[in-house]
Image (cartoon, rainbow, N blue to C red):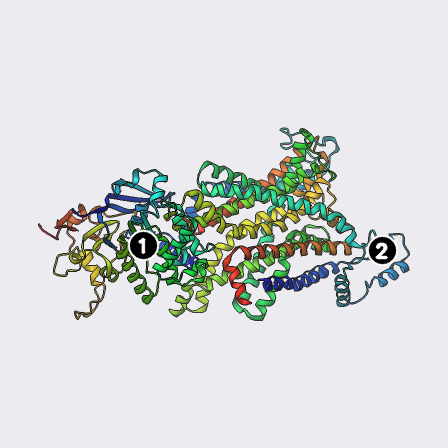
Amino acid sequence: MGTGEAHNKELVIDEEQTTVKRNGPMKEAWRRLRKSVTAMIGLGILAVFVFLAIFADVIADYETVVISMDGTRMLQRPSLEHLMGTDHLGRDIFARIVHGARVSLTIGLFVTGFAVLIGGFFGASTAYWGGLYDMIIMRICDILLSIPGVLLGLAIIAVLGPSLINLLIALVIANIPIYTRFIRSTVLTIVEQDFIEAARACGTSDLRIIYKHIITNVTGPIIVQATLSIAATILSAAGFSFLGMGIAPPHPEWGAMLADARGYLRTDPHFMIFPGIAIILTALSFNLVGDGLRDALDPRLKT
Amino acid sequence: MTRYVINRIFLLIPIALGVTFIVFTIMNLTPSDPGRIMLGEMADREAVSQLNRELGFYDPFFVRYFNYVAGAVRLDFGVSFRSGRPVFEEIFLRFPNTLNLAFLAVICAAAVGIPLGILSAVKQYSHIDTVSRIISMLFAAAPVFFLGMMGIYIFSLRLQWLPAFGASTWEHFILPVITLSIPSAASLLRLTRSTMLETINQDYIRTARAKGASERRVIFRHALKNALLPIITILGMNFGFLLGGAILIENVFSIPGLGQLLVNSIRLMDIPQVMASTLFLALLFTLIILVVDLMYSFIDPRIKAKYSKIK
Amino acid sequence: MPRELMSIENLSVIYKTDLETVRAVNGVSITLEKGKTLGIVGETGAGKTTLALSLMRLLPKATGRITEGRVILQDQDLYKLSEIEMKSIRGNLVSMIFQDPMTSLNPIMKVGDQIAESLILHNDEKLTKEQISARVEETLTLVGIPPFRKNDYPHQFSGGMKQRVVIAIALACKPQLLIADEPTTALDVTIQAQVLSMMADLKEALDTAMIMITHDIGIVAQICDYVAVMYAGEIIEYGTIQDIFDHSREHHPYTVGLFGSIPDLKHKTRRLSPIDGLMPDPTMLPRGCAFSPRCPKCEPLCKDQKPPDRDNNGHRIRCYFVGGAQ
């Protein structure tokens, strides 16, 4: 792994130079992120969805618009009154998509947040303690990872029954081994690097090393990974709901909306297109931002 | 080398046991009542608990786990609560559909994703690169079931080129396979591109150029062969991902496959069937990863050497 | 008239990215005679490797760009050749040895095949497979590797042996010019000496000219005929080995500093005298002499205008205060 080491050394030098020359790594990363057109598009789309999610109740009332059926206006085409038309139960699709944004973003952030916290705890502690504890946790991870995530999630939901909370639990559990492994290996590669040795040799205290070197160096990769996995989580949550294993009707969820639309493909394609686009745009925006962050945080890709 | 292969196959046993244990544990947290499911809502309560006793449902957890593993070793995975027939009967009946779907989708994804990824890397920053990156970005963010529905809408309902539901002829597989492979192809393209770019920047590629090798030779003889190693691994992982996707796609296209069986069994709380299906898919996935690892070690002389020395 | 092999005329190279433009090589002119060795010395980042890569036309495609100048090799202008013509020169007429032998070899190709590749690519003599295989063994023997090891992979060799393989690849086609970019930096000191003396012997045996890029003045003293001192992309002093190593002559202040930072065993000094400061940022080079910010003899004129070359019988120094007037 000669190349890896060589790269890492460069990486350290580069970082020091940027901190000396410019306004610190975070500002530098932001400056580079702003240069990336794709990342900015991603951030733009994301901002729209976050806005919709926050002001969902202002845009459309939950009780009266989002979940109340109206037999007089079923399956209407998009119009000024109903921007995206209505569904098979006469509910405004736009209103349901706006409230669906709230559900999807919450799932994405909640699942990833908890998975990072729990996986971070196991990952960091196994990297720190090593030994038997490390071995046992890692073997458990191996086993969990040898079950495809969807299967693990389905098995958990099969037991707990389909609901939002159970979906969250299933997704968090399916993501924990991924983060445990990821954070463990990230911490290990940093701990083994020469500059940690150098800091130790300079008499830097353990706490300062953990804070100043390990945490600052681990944050970047974790943020990138987390951003990308929010997209994956939103996609799989939609998949579970599509199978009827996620959020129970009548609550608005994009995957569940698509499942409803299946029966009306021939006559009412608008019913499926809007929720589908909503899922794609949300997942896409997180992917774009994640990719942009990865490039911005990686000093090797500067040239 | 043979020793390594045998070792790796033996290593499957603890993983299989672990997977069984986890799936068994999850499944047995369920407050289910197999006797009730088998005999129906109208059955006498006494008969139900009698049947439950016969099934060993009241035994302690570890006894039940032990019995299950003991049965599994004899290839006895129990009977479906619903049909009363051995669970693997149903699995083997449906497995070919799922395998076809996932296998063909992997091939499609590789056939499209890898060459485009190479092209994108070689022509970095060109129009081809930009276009294929944007398209792959979009498709990597698309849920398979939505792609499937779009496929049905456009090619079956509007154009009437292809059948939409079922699995009776090979034409029925065209749409499911293509829609299932699209997100995989997209992610494979992105991965191939970044791996190729990384490889192209290696020193030995510069050495090859300094020898006077043509760009073609540099790309195919030197870069691609090295880049292929991580790509093969990801291809194996993708197979697992596709098995998951197949569950959704089978649902969209009403294909009688394992995924559909699994989802239906979950709805009916048919525990033995869910357990056996999950176990079967998980072990299949593990086996594929093993095969990929072995292939890897045959291609890469460094890994090959490492394990020959252990001998 | 010496037999001129190659001349570099006023060569300038930049690396251009979205964010900045790095002026890596600035107006370099040197000539090299057949069979002679030119040493290029300078600090890390002085533009030595860039110079070498631009001679091979192997600059990173996305960023590197030759802005002016030309390179004449055996009466051919390298920058006017097509890529196909250039390919037939690379590895054949001009070969290059890279700095890090650990990463310079393809990890999944047998070393014999990697050496044979050069021969197959430049098979002007229409050699048969057997003849090529014989040549590979011959070349391996030449660099001191037992021929039977041609079926081994790079990971089975030590660092020094890998560098021998890299050298064997470069020498397989008996090139006229060998560019060695810090060929021994990554090696242990004892191995360094072995590899260097082997290179010197081979150069003699094959009558190959060589450009030796290094930051190690000891290596220069050992095997070079001519020396060019590079600073911030410029050749600031050039001369024969005698010119440069003669302490009684006048030198560029940077060269003086460079020699001052290595210990001299013959004279008793209290301490080494390193050069103060750092190389200028290649994205913002000073207007005048590039060395002026660090120069002990700096005058206002130096900061304002680039000094011309002072030529004293081929010993060129780019400084106002050396080698003549003022």
Q: Chain of mark 2?
A: B
Quadrant including the N terminus of chain A: bottom left
Q: Is residue C48 left or right of residue B227?
A: left
Task: Name the residue at 42% across, 46% down.
Answer: A32
Asked if badges 1 and 2 are on one and the same chain, I answer: no
> Quadrant of residue B290 in the image?
bottom right
> Quadrant of residue B50 in the image?
bottom right
- Residue B187 in the image, given as x and y percentages of width and height: 56, 45
Task: Say few, some or many: other residues with alpha carbon within 10 Å of mark 2 (under 14 / 14 to 19 / 20 or more).
Answer: some
Residue where numbered disc 2 is placed: B36
Task: Name the residue at 54% across, 38% down.
Answer: B135
The disc at residue C181 is 1
Q: Nearer the viewer, mark 1 or mark 2?
A: 1
Does residue C276 appear anywhere in the picture?
no
Say what amino acid the circle numbered 1 marks. Answer: Asp
Task: Name the residue at 49% across, 56% down.
Answer: A219
Front residue of C53 and B176: C53
Kindly state the secondary structure of the residue where label 1 is placed: strand
Mark count:
2
The disc at residue B16 is none
Q: Is residue C248 left or right of residue B26?
A: left
Position of residue B263 relative to residue A65, above or below, is: below
Q: Chain of mark 1?
A: C
Does residue A226 appear anywhere in the picture?
yes
- Residue A215 in the image, given as x and y percentages of width and height: 47, 60
Front residue of C161 and A54: C161
Front residue of B71 and A157: B71
- Residue C249 in the image, given as x and y percentages of width and height: 12, 58
Distance from the alpha carbon under mark 1 to that under mark 2: 80 Å
